[in-house]
Amino acid sequence: VTVPIREQVWGLEVGELSAPFPLNEAFSFVRAEQVLPVHEEEFGRFEKKINSIIHTRERQRVWDAWIAEQEALAGVSEHMDAIAEMIADSAVVTTGEFLKEQPAIAIELPSGEGVTGTKMRRAISHEAMQNAMAPFNHHLTAARQQLKGDLVLGHLAESQGYFDHPTVVERLEKDWEKSMIEQLRNRVRAMRG
């Protein structure tokens, strides 16, 4: 059972209908036909995994909320005309045609740092290649969230002097941390370039 359906079924009494909810580009509702008892032995076998899933989702929820707050504080803006161009090409998202050059800024900070349409098209295409069955809106949303988050994190790191901080410079000497820091630094540079 998918997560959206599970969330709607939770707490329903037998025969009760859920409120309508979006599912696969349509609105659906569910009705509880029966409620099965929990088998304590089976639950014990999966309790650690269930707790792990719950904690992972909660961490992601908190992270997403923090990123959204940082985006608002940083003043991230999206240029809907640039995004509309990508939507107009959505039928060819899994082809090379979609990857055409679009140098106009699609996502931007007040400082002028931003993400070009070309970079956003690549991110959307990457999402589409990972899950070709998902609708274009899914790919667009995932790419927008990732790129806005990267832009804001890079901006925060740079504005706080992260890359020049002595402990970061010291960590650059360690191989396992060096690649992570370099990757973030390169993302920041790529956002500007």
Image: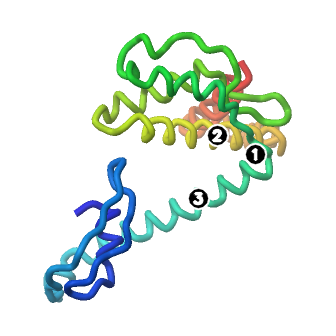
How far apart, in angstroms, are the residues tagged by discs 3 and 1? 24 Å
Residue tagged by mark 2?
Answer: 148
Residue 116, quarter of picture = top right
Residue depicted at 47% across the width and 29% down the height: 124
Residue tagged by mark 1?
Answer: 167
Q: Amino acid at mark 1?
A: Thr
How far apart, in angstroms, are the residues tagged by discs 1 and 2? 27 Å
Residue 170, quarter of picture = top right
How far apart, in angstroms, are the residues tagged by discs 3 and 2? 14 Å
| Location of residue 94 with respect to 57 vertically, above or below | above
| Location of residue 95 with respect to 16 vertically, above or below | above
Determine crowd level at label 2: few under 14, some 14-19, many 20+ residues with C-alpha closer than 10 A: many
Q: From the viewer's perspective, is the residue at label 3 or at label 1 nearer?
A: 3
Residue tagged by mark 3?
Answer: 63
Looking at the picture, how far across and down is residue 49, in whole percent?
29, 69
Name the quarter where the C terminus is drawn.
top right
Q: Amino acid at mark 2?
A: Lys
Q: Amino acid at mark 3?
A: Trp
Badge 3 or badge 1: first in the primary sequence: 3
